[in-house]
Structure formats: C-alpha cells, structure tokens
Image (spheres, helix red, strand yellow):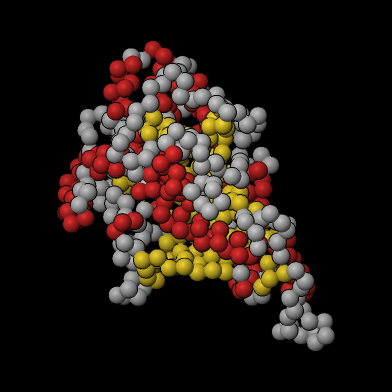
Amino acid sequence: MGGESADWPLAVLEKRHRSVEFVLSPAINMLLSLRPGITCQISRLLSRSLMTTSTGHSNGKLPDMSEGCIPVHVNNVRDKLREIVGVSTNWRDHVQAMEERKALQSLLAKRQEDLPSRRMKDSYTEVMLPLGSQPELREKYLNVYNNVRFGRILEDLDSLGVLICYTHTKSESRNTSPLSIVTALVDKIDLRKQIISPDCDIKLTGHVSWVGKTSMEVKMHMLQLHDGVYSPVLDATFVMVARDPENRRPAFVNPLVPNGEEEENLFKQGELNKSRRVAFSTASLLKMAPEAEERKIVHDMFLNTLDTNTVSFRSRVLPHNSVWMEDAKLKGLEICHPQQRNIFNRIFGGFLMRKAYELGWATACSYGGSRPYVVAVDDIMFQRPVELGSLLFLSSQVCYTENNYIQIRVHSEVSDPITREHHTTNIFHFTFMAEEEVPRIVPKTYGESMLYLDGKRHFDAVVQTKNGQNV
C-alpha cells in the first residue's frame, strides 16, 4: 500500500477518525475501546493484520498492531451511533425518530459513480475488549468452564462488521448517515483455538475487503494477548448490505479501489467468494437433485438400516452406535422484546446468532455426551428481519457426524402472535468438535437424507478451508 499514510498529518488523521461513530452490541455497550488504526504505519499494520491462515499466522504470533498508535477510548459508543443515525435512546420517541429519517432520502447517491472511492485502509478499525486489564468486564463473557462465551463474540463481530462499513461509507460533510447498514450473510468464521481465555485482553480488527454496488464484504480477525504477543483466535468474513433510511430498498455504497498486490488479491478473493456463494446456492438440494455420489450415500445408508429378517422396505433397524436423526434435535422460543432491538427497530442480528449458537451448542453437547468446541460457523443467511414483538422459534438439528465432529443446523422462524403467520428468518450452520468420537447420525426419511447431505456439504467445505484449499 505504499506507506503513503506516513506522510499524512496526524491532526488530519485524528480528525478523520473522530468522526467514525457506531454502536456496538448491547453485550459490549460501554465496554470496548474503539481504536481506528490508520493513525500510524497503516501499510505494515494492514498487511500484518490481514494475513490469512495460509500466509501469515503459521507461527501463532503477530506483532502488536497498535505500535505507535494512541488508542481512543469510547465510553458510550451506543449514544454515538444514535447520534450518527439520528435515533433516540427513548423507546417512546424511537418510532418518531425513525419516521424523521425519511427526510434523509435526498442524501442518497443516485449512482455509485457519484460517491468518492475508498481504500481498504480507510475502513481499517481495531476494537479492544480489555478482559485482562479490566477484570470487571469478564462476567458478561464468562461461561461455566471459565472461558469466554463464543455467543458474545458473535455479537461483537456483528457489531464490528457494521461499524467498519459505516467507516467505509462515512461522509466528511455530514454527521448523520442516510444509510441503513445491516448484516446480510456470515460467509464463514474459522476458529484457530478451542478455548478463549477470560483473563487476557482481546483485539478485534477488520476492514472492507470487497465492494459491489450495494454490498460490502468485511474481513475481521480476533487476537488475544498472551505473554506480550497477540495470537490469532479466529478469522471471519461477513457480507453487509446498505439500504435506504427506511431500510426498505438497496442504496449505493462507495466503491473500493485496491492499492497494491495484497489488496488486489483480497479484492479478487471477494469476487471468488461471491461466485462460490452463487454456485453453492444454485446447487442447493432445495433446487437440484443430489449428485450421483450423494445418491449412493443415501442409498447405502438406507440398505444399512433395513431389517434383514423381514426383507421389507418399511422395516428399519438402527445400526450399532447410531442415532436416528429425529431423536437428535432441540427447540427453543424467544419473545422479541425491545431490549434486543438494533438502531433500526428490528432485532439485533448478533442476538439472533448468539441464541442460535447457544441452542446449537446445547444440542451438540447433549448428542456427544461431552463438552463440544466450535470449529467453524458458515453460510448464515439473514433472509428477513425479525420484528419486535415476534415469537422467535429456534430448531436445532444434528444433521451430520464424522468421527468426533458434529454438524449442527439451526432453523429460525418468526410467528406473528396476532396473524399466526410463520416465516423463516435464518438458517445457521455450526461445526463442533467433541472430546470423543460421537455416534453416527442416521436419517430415516427422504427429507432427513437431504438434511444429512446438506450438512455433509457444509462440513466438507469447513475441512477444505482448514486444509487451505478454500481460504
């Protein structure tokens, strides 16, 4: 990236980033320190922080990315976001405030070409979660095993992703943003460590890595301080979309111009990610028949469960060390209160991810009979927003197993308590690893067989990523 930021006046950089304001999730309200990382040596900073599994973290160490930077502590980031979006802290005034946002329609760009282009470094952001230096923050993040709750991290990643996108689209000429930026997709989250310590500081970094007309891909990394060195914990890729002030129609975002070979590669990877997602969706088992090899897998499982004594298609016997798929599920219900709302008066996406993850974890724990560790999260599509007052139904299913791995699918749908209409809002996919080998999951119906194959596809994709074939 040419190291050009070294020539920028520090006062200009500080002014530029004091204007970046966004709300983080309720789980980390008033707990995090926001650190815009462009104030020093951005070329080396970005290149070191954005290395993928296959290129930079093989030794488990990462130089301190805050070297030479002065951190900015934000005591109340939620109030700052309400200021930039123009909404109220008072629930009774919130609806009126959202109504007033309609006037911001005139600020939207008519064409993407009318917006100034941005670099990856322009959206680079660091957020500190000081669990080690501020022990009073730990309780919200602790689980019964005295480790950090991954569900809380999901909330933080979701908030950080939107923050980064607001940074990318920030206008110097106004304080209020006309954009409604929401999470469209969690492409993937790859875990490098099983356990996240509750008594060491955590650093979350990220930036926009690819931009379409109205969507943005965000790369994020989580690191934890151990023995004076920040070691990588996870890598995440989110896709965010920009919409109009009423969150009804798409809105154009600033184009992204890569600078240098590393950024060119990241941008090209974003294009490949988009193509991969389109291909995966096109080949969905809800649209196309299974491939020949998959059909053979289903038929072999069917033959393996036939009762040899009766030689009947209807008589089925569960093989040794196996569990019927219908017996490996859990369900949950959430009432969507205003407390879980985001600034656009819908349920916070991070909250949905946390509740789905916790139900998925409980399902894996119950199935495997031991503590499961999350390995990966992938392909979470936010199909429709969850309105306040809705009844949120969550259904978690073990859909594939292999050795000590458990693939979990969580389906969420909302029901209007008045009209009783049901709509699917999200499908979540989690890969867990148990401490010991788990029983084999066995489908009985054709529908369950499709769930099995879909789970296998997601698991195989995770394995490919771990092996460096799809990074």
Residue 454 makes an appearance in the image: no
| Numbered disc total | 0
The answer to which image quadrant residue 124 occupies is: top left
Position of 404 relative to 226 (above/below): below
Q: Residue at x 36, y 66 (%)?
A: 335
* 31 on left or right of 327: left
Q: Residue furthest front?
A: 136
Position of 429 relative to 158 (above/below): below
Q: Residue at x 36, y 60 (%)?
A: 386
* 225 on left or right of 135: right
Where residue 467 sits: x, y (%)? 69, 42
Residue 320 makes an appearance in the image: yes
Position of 224 relative to 47 (above/below): below
Q: Residue at x 63, y 71 (%)?
A: 325
Where residue 231 sits: x, y (%)? 57, 32
* 410 on left or right of 432: left
Location of the C terminus (image quadrant): top right
The answer to which image quadrant residue 36 occupies is: top left
Q: Residue furthest top?
A: 7
Where residue 287 sits: x, y (%)? 55, 64
Where residue 404 sits: x, y (%)? 70, 56
Residue toward you, 355 or 106: 355
Q: Residue at x 21, y 55 (%)?
A: 91
The answer to which image quadrant residue 361 occupies is: bottom right
Q: Residue furthest right?
A: 309
